[in-house]
Image (spheres, helix red, strand yellow):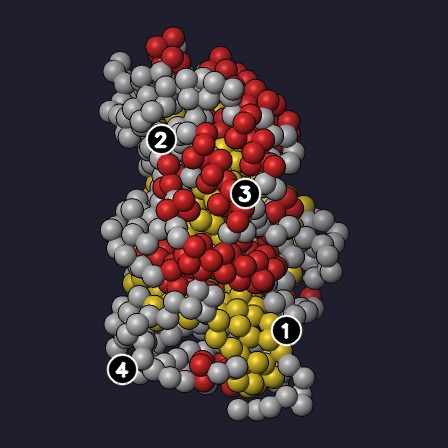
Amino acid sequence: MTGQPVHLRNGGVSVLLASSPAGVPSLLHWGLDLGELSAPDLEAYLTLLAPGVSHSALDQSRSLSVVPESTSGFTGTPGVEGHRPGRPTATWAARFLSWSWTVPEQSGAEQSGAEQSATLRSQDDEVGLAIQWHLELTLEGLVRVRTELTNIGATDYELSALRTVLPVPAEASELLDLTGRWSGERAPQRHPWPQGTWSRSSRHGRPGHDATLLLVAGTPGFGFRSGRVWGVHVAWSGDSTTYAERTPEGECLLGGGELLGPGEVTLAPGETYAAPWLVASCSDEGLDPLSERLHGWVRRHSPRTRSPRPVVVNTWEATYFDHDLGRLTALADAAAEVGAERFVLDDGWFAGRRHDRAGLGDWVVDRDVWPDGLHPLVDHVKGRGLEFGLWVEPEMVNEDSDLARAHPDWLLRGRGALPDTWRHQQVLDLQHPEAYAALRSALLALLDEYEIDFLKWDHNRDLIDVASGGRPAVHGQTLAFYRLLDELRAAHPGLEIESCASGGARVDLEVLTRTDRVWASDTLDPLLRTRIQRWTTLLVPPELTGAHVGGPVAHTTGRTARLGLRGAVALLGHFGIEWDLLGLDATDREALAAWVALHKEVRHLVLDGVLVRPDHPDPAVTVTGAVASDRSEGVFVVVVTDPTATQVPSPVQLAGLEPDRRYLVRAVDPSADRHPMDLGTSWMTGDGVVSTGGLLCRSGLRLPVTAPESAYVLRVRAVDADQRHP
């Protein structure tokens, strides 16, 4: 098939591709489903959208190619940048004019249970490049686009950038992205979208704590439940760029790609570079449906995690580096008693690791601390019916380690001297064949010897001033990391892995195809976590987002918080505990066990339900819910982070319910931990109230006079029509 208009439909979304009179393919529509379009309909649509010719411009009309080119008169960021060293002419500005189109037979109309796709190919013989542009429209209505570039010339081609873009309507005049820092990830920022380029780049060697996750353009004032929105994500765990661009000619584009260093990718004749997937989602009803499409795709590609997520106890804030078999077995006993299902031994178990300045790289059990290896602990944990997990940081090395002393050439560096240390560590060169083989063997030896169900895989420093084989190292390091994960999973198919990077610094869709959850942040301060988890789930399904109950005093901020707040904030994620259980009295253990029990009651909604985040007019009030896919039940968590703007807050709307169905709503307080300043009385003190889903969603319900740093949990269940009405 060549050049004919192609209309792809899936999941309530349409993608319309057409060829200009000059034969250049353009993406004319990505968004709300356009419905069935006949050939005359398509012809009329193309006529209505045909570009004109402007003054002081090219003398013929110009359509924006799926791969933007400066040679065609496009004044924005080009899709391809690079050159052939030593050849000054016809080597840097490609122009792809003649395209072939491949559209599978099932594409072109919505097919139940079938992915839709189109592949476009072209080449520029003068520059010596061939290009392939591939688009998929998934069952969920998610758009995935990838560009590949092949060197068909006779000499090396040095690639500077290969970007993938998608157009959005001009009505999307407001931008939203995320920024942050360590223990303060996922801070939203939004502003009008002016002419020019708004670019967000990561130069961390990982996405970083300030990673935007999604760059969203929308109609002014869009929220979680309102407004038209379009968002893109670069699925890549190394350096990347995501950008929004409005040109004076009228193009509005969202795009991105890998951020390459000078000489990082040089294509020899015949070699191909595949850019990361640009993953895009849209919605006509705000950010929640946009996230729902992303969550659905991730869930289809993470079959290992479709069973209930086990409640985790992690030892870090209970023991730090002080490992003692008696204390750890007692901690495992306490974990089992409160209802935990997975016990994770954190940092400090391997050779020389009594503090964070030594031992990284020596992935063997420290026999001074563990004379019988980890077997006594693993056996005890398994005997209590718990899964066993282990912390590792395979990509990092302390200079005070046997590995660094024996193989200093295995440490990444860009200059003669090693880079400045970061948390007392350097980076292992995974592109060095011997270094990779040694690491792979060490990890497989652990997995072969011990019954390890879960690896908490950490990555605690940025990659700065690093090179391998004489070129910047991040691209190759990232691919080697993927390869290592793939090989470990192939050898141990039941193994689960968490992507942790000093908190939430490696969260992206490519790593999520290889791992089973992400650690959202190193902070367990529930007020910070409320924001961090809310915006992490813009991209990541809640059941893949680690959410733990910490101790009464947050280690990162020193803030004291009641268990009722800490438990509620962790409830709608992959629930865990990061608290010294041996220091709890019987009352606290019983209260914590009640929160674990409540999570187990509702985690099927977290796993398979729809995440809803109703907007509230008061920024001090955050509402998060998980509603069953059949809308028969739901659970909502309301967190009050600051003093409310009014003494009696505005009603809370419970989104996602069926309007004509009747529901029983009741408040749940597992630990009987009501905030002492919350003096109000309301329907919450009784057995609940029955109301329609329409009223609960549109009018909402009032909470009592609320105090800052408090939380409420509301259970909602559909009832028979003969039940009482409020």
- Measuring from the top left, give residue 690's x and y in whole percent: 56, 85
Q: Which of marks 2 and 4 is nearer the N terminus?
A: 2
Give the distance between the C-alpha atoms of the residues marked 2 and 4, in whole angstroms: 47 Å
- Measuring from the top left, give residue 375's x and y in whole percent: 55, 25
Viewer-nearest residue: 558 or 594: 594
Estimate how packed mark 1 is, as few (under 14), some (14 to 19) or many (20 or more) residues with alpha carbons within 10 Å. Answer: some
Q: Earlier in the sequence, mark 3 or mark 4?
A: 3
Which amino acid is tagged 2? Phe
Viewer-nearest residue: 656 or 276: 656
Which amino acid is tagged 3? Arg
Query: Looking at the image, which residue is at 35% across and 57% down?
Result: 526
Q: In this view, does 310 lie above or below 94?
A: below
Dots 1, 4 in contact, CB < 8 A: no
Secondary structure under badge 1? loop
Task: Please give the residue where the numbered disc 3 appears in the rendered image.
Answer: 342
Task: Please give the residue where the numbered disc 2 appears in the rendered image.
Answer: 321
Give the distance between the C-alpha atoms of the residues marked 1 and 4, in whole angstroms: 33 Å
